């Protein structure tokens, strides 16, 4: 039995007209959609508020190569995101807030944007700068429970700044170009050095979504893209304490652990770095392929410059369309630096299976990772993971 409103009863009895009924019901609309959250929209459609989020619960088993270490079995709330977003007064003026509450509370995205049209959207706040495609693809849309070894070495994470973005020719070409503090999220800038980052994507056969899974489609889709990021790091930046979200600084360059005096002794007043990436992605008939290459050059005031690079190749196939997907990935990283803090030569091979109950809204992911570290002994570990993901 469905309850009837007073307005419906009065209209049916002829007490009010259809026009009066429409006017009485004119107002905001509130609706909940599983996987997309609760949305409130004003009567004119110019203002909206959406509250949603998603979570990932993971189990990990690590079999250490080092015989002196016991195996590790661990349950973890990997991610639990709360997301608020919408638009105010105009469909062109948007906002977004995202925080992670998996271990305390951490602010991730705080964004205000204005859409002048498809070719130009100006975005201000804290978010992910233009960088590798895998890092820009949301963690909930990844093929594996975690991103690749190469991406986890050379990503920029989140930062504070301003960015222009847009698309042309019905998303045939997408671009992003921005100026950022360069110190990571929730961290102010200690000097006048900034990070510049840009990206361009070309999708010659139609829009290519930021989604790594191979949903069945009769149309072959292809994406070719590339990005760059450039920054001068000074001793004042090091002293201010970088956030670990920027893995170029934290992992590839190993600057997070340095004091001001250590940095100055090793590199002088400044260290300039340039990161470039290129990718090829394709999907067709339930199969996907993705490959991405990262190259980094570090040029300090003191001492010689050095290079580092990395890549990943991954492929998958949905053996049961929209239900069961199998895949494999290989990733490697290498650095020419002679300093211990920034030297690495490592690779990983991964096998995985995903089961989708409701696409990404409700799924199980599992994988096994075989680690090979050529610069360390007893570090060829084996990691197994099982991860449950849900959107609400």
Image: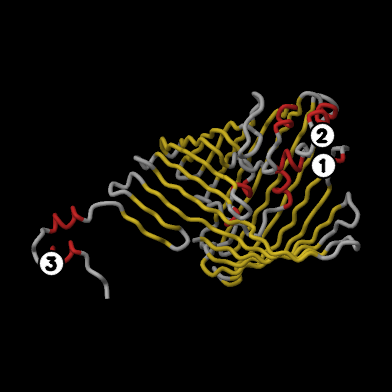
The image position of residue 186, as x and y in percent, is 61, 38
In this view, the residue in front, 87 or 275, is 87
Q: Nearer the viewer, mark 2 or mark 3?
A: 3
> In which quarter of the view is residue 325 placed?
bottom right
The image position of residue 385, as x and y in percent, is 70, 65
- In terms of sequence position, does the residue under pointer 2 or pointer 3 come before the other? 3
- In terms of sequence position, does the residue under pointer 2 or pointer 1 come before the other? 2
Crowd band around label 1 with a 10 angstrom C-alpha radius: few (<14), some (14–19), many (20+): many
- For disc 1, the marked residue is 335
In three-dimensional space, the C-alpha distance between marks 2 and 3, rounded to whole angstroms, equals 80 Å
Q: Nearer the viewer, mark 3 or mark 1?
A: 3
The image position of residue 10, as x and y in percent, is 13, 64
- The reply to whether dot 2 and dot 3 touch (C-beta < 8 Å) is no
Q: Which mark is residue 306?
A: 2
* Secondary element at image label 3: helix
In this view, the residue in front, 210 or 391, is 391
């Amino acid at each position: 039995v469905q309850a009837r409103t007073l307005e419906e009863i009065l209209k049916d009895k002829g007490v009010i007209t259809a026009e009066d009924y429409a006017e009485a019901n004119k107002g905001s609309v509130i609706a909940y959609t599983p996987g997309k959250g609760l949305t409130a929209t004003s009567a004119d459609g110019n203002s909206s508020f959406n509250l949603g989020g998603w979570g990932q619960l993971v189990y990990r088993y690590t079999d250490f190569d080092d015989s002196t270490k016991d195996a590790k079995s661990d349950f973890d709330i990997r991610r639990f995101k709360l997301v608020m977003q919408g638009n105010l007064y105009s469909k062109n003026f948007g906002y977004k807030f995202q925080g992670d509450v998996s271990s305390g509370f951490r602010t991730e995205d705080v964004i205000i944007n204005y859409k002048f049209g498809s070719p130009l959207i100006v975005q201000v706040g804290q978010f992910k700068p233009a960088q590798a495609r895998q890092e820009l693809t949301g963690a909930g849309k990844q093929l594996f429970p975690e991103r690749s070894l190469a991406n986890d070495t050379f990503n920029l994470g989140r930062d504070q700044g301003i960015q222009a973005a847009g698309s042309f020719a019905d998303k045939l070409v997408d671009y992003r170009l921005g100026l950022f503090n360069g110190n990571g999220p929730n961290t102010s800038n200690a000097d006048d050095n900034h990070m510049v980052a840009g990206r361009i994507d070309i999708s010659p056969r139609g829009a290519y979504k930021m989604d790594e899974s191979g949903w069945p489609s009769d149309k072959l889709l292809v994406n070719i893209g590339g990005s760059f990021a450039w920054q001068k790091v000074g001793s004042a930046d090091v002293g201010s304490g970088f956030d670990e979200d920027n893995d170029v600084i934290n992992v590839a360059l190993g600057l997070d652990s340095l004091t001001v005096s250590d940095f100055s002794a090793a590199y002088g007043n400044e260290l300039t770095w340039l990161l470039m990436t290129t990718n090829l992605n394709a999907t067709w008939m339930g199969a996907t392929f993705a490959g991405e290459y990262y190259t980094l050059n570090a040029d300090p005031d003191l001492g010689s410059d050095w290079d580092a690079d990395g890549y990943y190749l991954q492929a998958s196939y949905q053996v049961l369309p929209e239900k069961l997907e199998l895949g494999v990935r290989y990733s490697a990283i290498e650095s020419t630096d002679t300093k211990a803090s920034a030297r690495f030569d490592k690779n990983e091979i991964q096998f995985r299976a995903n089961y989708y109950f409701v696409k990404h809204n409700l799924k199980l992911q599992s994988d096994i990772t075989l680690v090979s570290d050529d610069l360390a002994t007893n570090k060829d570990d084996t990691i197994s993971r099982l991860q449950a993901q849900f959107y609400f």
